[in-house]
Every structure is written in structure tokens, then in C-alpha cells.
Amino acid sequence: MRGILPEKAMTGIAASTPLHGPALRALQRVLVAAQDERILRVLAIVDNLADRGEADKLIAPLRGRLAELRPRRTLNLSRLLFIPLEPLIVGGADWRAGASSIPRTALSPLAQQVTHELGARAEAISAASAQLARNDDLERIVETGEDLWLRAAKILAAAPVPPGWTTASGLQARDHTALAGSTAALLAQAPSLLRVVVRARAGIAPEPAALSAILASVAPAGSLPLTMMIAMAMEWLRSELLIRVADEFVARQDDPTLRATADRAVDFVLDGIERSLLPSLDVAGATRDVRRIAITLKNLDLWSERHASKRGRIEQVHRGVDAVCRERFASELEARLIEPSAGIAAGGDDTMIALEATARDLRRFETTARQIGSAEHYDRQLQRAAEALRPSAGEDTLACIGRIRLVEILRGPDAAMAMLKARAT
Amino acid sequence: MSKSQIAAIRQEFHLVTRFVPTTFLERGVATPFTTPQLAGARARPGERSSLEVIVPNPSGGQGVYILPWGSIDSLCNPTLHDRRLNEAVLLLRGVTPEAIRHTARDVAAEGLAGRGAQAAARRAREAESRACLQANFDLLLEVVRQVELEGENPVPPEQDSPAALEWRAKRAVARLAPRLKCLPETVVLMLEQLAACFGSIGVGRSARISIAVARLVRLRREVAEFAEQKPDDNGAEARLIVSTADLTIQMAKATLADAQELPRDIVRLLQRWAADPDGLLRLVARSDWLLDGWDRICALWELAPALGRTIAELVVLVPVVPREAYEWISQPVRIASQMPAHRGKTIVQQFEDWRTGETVCDLIARNELLLEKIL
């Protein structure tokens, strides 16, 4: 399939072209098999679409590979506007009125409304956005985005339903009121939250008072925006402290609907995990997915010590993730390492180097997935793989050493040494 | 390495908090292990056992652990490559940078550090072989230049035809032999032996050592720029690297110049070789000893340049310049550029952290890549 990516077809994909089911999966498979430069070209096409719509789904399985390729994905005003809200964005079909999420179909009309109200200033902000890329330093993004987020918060707080809203978004007029209001409340606090994230990424622990102040600023907007802020902050920060602060904050509220927001935010996060377990099709990307989920679940495990009612749900998600990880690891091990290892003797250095890279990817996956559970399963799988990789009697020294190295990567030097000694005798 | 592992090492082995070797042999020779816990390990002749290993304090703080070579596996679980290297180093009769380099190449050529390192070992052997041939040729040119009578041949030897040069070289060697009280065949043999010794120094042209000095000069410049631009990001450590690099560059250049000067008096060089080959070998190898360990530092910086965390990793590897070095150089060195007394921070390097996605095999793979660059 390599080299025959339907790039021309890609340019026709827009929000109005629904992509799902077998057609979507077929295109995803083509992309996964494509060479790096083709992926980057397709990515540029998707990034340049005025309305990305469902095209985003296409590149979702490639997030791991994209993280490694680190392409420079230039921003525009609309993409910069919604960066803080990314954890809340869901596909149009997954959104329900009153949910703590934002449907992707609403982004473009909301962005257009903001752009229109910004007037002449929109041009300067667009120019500044174009200087940025999504994978730039978050601090730089916050510096540039702060002005836009604060202005957009004011605009959306008072924004009427724009003409053509229903046609453009597929949503009802009352949905606009709820979404614009929530978005306004969240964007107003986005700079404060993301500055905490920037500091946390630099190793500076968040101040509980700072987190509490952010929540206090959103609370007057109502329970939905507060739920969304807690969920958004949980995804951005992945810190047990945040959940604790949120817990303590909502417990202090008189309004019973506000007191339930932390629970609802946890539900939102768990729904998100269940909705998209390991979306990446490559091992490196799947490892990132597992790591994100494992950190979230560890935080939620601690939280559930104080919330017995949610323990069952968290454990259920835990088990679900564990099962998917186990199955995924076993199949990846077979398909990407054991089967291709049959070609070691005939393959050259490139074959061996690629197999070693795959073995390391699998080790990273396994190391991370163990945090979810089933350590014994992974031990058994690695042992099985090592046996399958055992050098055969007639194999030449180069191929034998290649196999032994794969065993060393998967099971460590002692297992590899034992195999080397067994071959010598 | 986890804090509990570090605590276990502290309990079992004695930490030498102030490691100030007076000689290069006492400093030991950098050994290119791939096991993360053995980064910066050095081999040296032991007091009680035949060999000792010196390992930088894994906590990142001051000091080193010195333990018998055979105890390496009680410190960590070495990679297969390191187990083979460990065995091979034990068989060495003397520990020198050259001996360790050759041993490391031989082990890497077996493939246990990967195909990249295997190919790099092959390339390094070929390059060394070419450098020896070149040095042999250049030494012969020196013989012709210095032995032929003035005006005897108007064509400079390097511009003469191969056949004519061959004839002129044989004539020069024949003239030289009686002055050295030996047969012409012995002169040819001595020139071949000297070529092996001068391959890395170069005879009238730059060779491996000059390239290594240039690499270190580049590292020094880039790290100094980094320290200036980001003084708060391990700036003190960066300045320490710069100071030590300064001192090493000055001394390496001086000892290299001394060695490169030797073939300018080919008769004296051959006489010294005949009388005291070990002494001459030691003299020529001085710049190699001075630069020992810097190749890994340069390679690390080239892999991950301009990062504070790279500086934190490099500073642990910076070799102390022993007092012996000051006796080696004919010109005084600016003492002001000596390295600061100690590093202050404690940097515990995590070898496995699922939260960051870093695994031991990633670090080993990175170290294998370093090995490719330093063989």
C-alpha cells in the first residue's frame, strides 16, 4: 500500500463529507502504511482546510508517529482559539445537549463569530497565530493566545445566536447559548490554567490556591462550565493534586449542583477513556495513549479512596483498559516482531535495526501497560516472544546475534546470556 | 537508577568523595560501556586486584566509587556487550586509551552492541589502517627529504613518480642504516612500527587526534554560548565543562605539537625508537591520554545539543586533569582556566520512568549510538 496515498481525494474532505465506518478505517490504514513525507503532506492538507471537520479523525491514529516526526503544524486564529479546550472537543456524533464536551461542528461557527466581532484586530491575531505551530513551546502559545482567549471570552459571553448556526453546526439555537456561555467561562480562565501547566511541565508543582482560584472564577457561570473546567484541567494537568483541590472546592459550595461537578468531571474523563481506548494504530502512539490513561487512572484510584460510589466505575474502566492493552500487546508482538523476525537471516542491517526499534517500542508499551495491571501476562508474553526468537541451529552468527539482541531488549541481559550460552553448548 | 539502588551501592562500596588523581593511570581509561549505570566508567590497574573500575557517583553528586573490575555486576546488571567488553579488558596486559579503543572495537565488531556499532567498528579499523599507511608513506617522505643531499634531486619527493620515489626511498634508507648501525631492512621495519604509533598523530598532516581536538574546541564554544544564553539552566555546570575543556585543549595542542615535531629529526626519532620504544610510545600517546573520555562528552552533546539536561549529564563525565599533565608540557598553561573545585548539584538520573516513557533499553540504545560515534 505504500506510495499510493490518495492525496487528491483528501482535498475534497471537509466537514460536509462524513467519514466513518469502513471507509474511514480503510483510509486510516493507508495513512498508517504511508511513508513519512506523504504523511506530512496529508497533514498539511488537513491543517490548511478551512474547516477540518471529520478530517481530524483521519490523522488521529497517527498521533504517535506525528509526535516523533514533529512536523511544524502552523496555527490559525481558529486553532489557537480552541487549544485550551482541546480535551473537551468531541466528534459531532458523540455530543449530546448538556454534555461536558464541545462538539467539533461548533468550532468553526464559534470561531467565525469571534473573528467577526474582533474586527480589524482579527488580522493581527491571525498573523500572530500563523507564526506559531501546535507543537511549539506551550509558554509561547500562551503568550500569544492570552489576548485572543480573553477577548473571545468577552465576545462569546454576550454573543447572540449567529445566522446560519444550525446549518453550519448541525446544532439547535439553544445549544449555542449553552456552548458559547461555557466556552466564554473557560476561555476567561484559560491563560491562568495553562500558565500552571507550563510551570508544572517545568517541574514546579501547582499551587492549590492558584487552582482553587481558577475554579472559583468559573463557578458563578454554573455547574456545566465548572464541570468542564475540572475535566479540562484534569486532562491538561494529570495531577492528583488538581482532583483533590477540585474535590475540596466543590465540597465548600452551597449549591448542590456545584457539589456534583467533580463527580461529573470524573465521569467525563472516564467516558473519554472508554470512547477512545487506544486510538493510535502504531505502537509508539499507543504507548502514549496508555501512559495518558495510566496516569489518569492512578489519580482517579487515589480520588476513589474518598469516593466509594465511583470505585466500581473506575475499576470497570481499569479492567477494560487492561484487557485492551493485553490484547493489543499480544497481537503487536506477534505481528510486528515475531512474524517479521523470520526474515532476519535474509535481511540486512536495515531489517535488524527496524526490528530492534520495534522491540524497544514494545518494551515501552509493556512497561507502561504494566501500570494498568496484568504484570504476569506481560512476563508470559515476553517469555513466549523470547522463545520464538531463539536462534535456530543452522543460523549464521550474524542472524543469531541479531536474535539474541532482540531477546536482550525484551527480557534483559540475563535471559539473552542464557540463550547465548545454550547455543554455544 | 532508583534511590534505593543508590543506597544499596553506598552500603556495599566505599565512596571516594574527593577523587583527585595525580597521574593519568590513576585517573583510569574511559571504557565505552553501554549499561546506563556504567556511564563514565574508567579502567585502571588495581592495588589489590589486577584491574579496578572507577564509576562516577550515580547520585550525580561529588565523588566516585572504586571497585574491583570483577565486581561490576554487583553494581548493575550489565548488557551482553558490556559483559564481553568486561572479559576482554581483563585480558589486557596494560590499560591505555589505545588498548581500550582497540578492545572496544573488537567487541563491537561481534555485533552485541548492534549493527550500527558493528559497522562503525569496521569503519574505524579501516580508517586506522589507512592512517597507518599514510603515516608510513609520510615518514618515508621525511627520510628522503632529510637524508638526500642538498640539490641532489630538484623534484620534491611528494611530487615525484611512484617508481622514482620508491628508488629514492630505498637509497635514503640505505644511507641511513649505517648511521643507525643497523640493516636497511631494520630501518624499514622501524618506520613501519613508527607509522603505527604516528597514525593518529599524523606526519605533516592532521589525523585523528587533531580532529578530536577540533571537535572539543567546537564543544567548548557551543557550551560557552549555551552558558551565556541560559545562565540559569545548569549554567555553573556548563562553565565547569568550558574551564576543563579549555585546559585540556591547551594541553592536548601542546603535547600534539611536541609529538608532531619528532619526525622533523628522523635520525633522532629512529634512534629513540631503537633505544626506548616504550618511552617514545608514551610520549606520542600523551595527547590521547589528555583527550581520553572527551569523545563521549562530545558525542553526547552532538546528539542532544543546547539542553540543560545534557549539560547535567556531561558534567559528571568531565575528566579531571591530573597533576602529571603539567609536567608534560613544554609551555606554561594559564592556570586561571583550571576547573572549579567541585560541582554542587545532585542530579539523580532516572534510568526507567514509565511516566516519561523512558526505559532502560532506550538509554542503552542511546549509549550504543554514542559507541558508534567514538569507536
Image: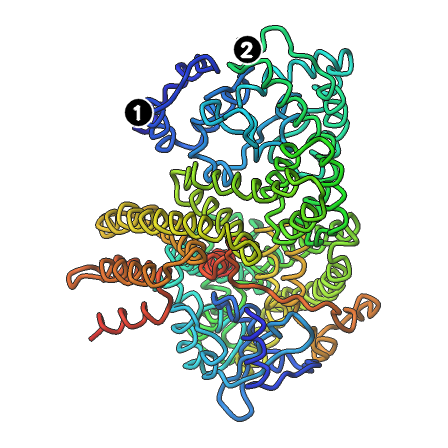
- Asked whether, in this view, residue B238 is left or right of residue A350, the answer is right
The residue closer to the viewer here, B335 or B226, is B226
The percent position of residue B36, horizontal first and vertical second, equals: 51, 66
Mark 1 neighbour density, 10 Å: few (under 14) some (14–19) many (20 or more): few
The residue closer to the viewer here, B33 or A337, is A337
Q: Which amino acid type corresponds to the residue marked 2 in the rendered image?
A: Thr
Q: Secondary structure at mark 1?
A: helix
Q: Is residue B168 visible?
A: no
Mark 2 neighbour density, 10 Å: few (under 14) some (14–19) many (20 or more): some
Q: Is residue B315 visible?
A: yes
User: Which picture quadrant has residue B207?
Assistant: bottom right
Residue at the image position 42 percent from the left and 37 percent from the top: A279
Q: Callout 2: residue from which chain? A: A
User: What residue is disc 1 on?
Assistant: A22
User: Which picture quadrant has residue A221?
Assistant: top right
Real-space Cα distance between discs 2 and 1?
Answer: 28 Å
Per the rendering, the mark at residue A166 is 2
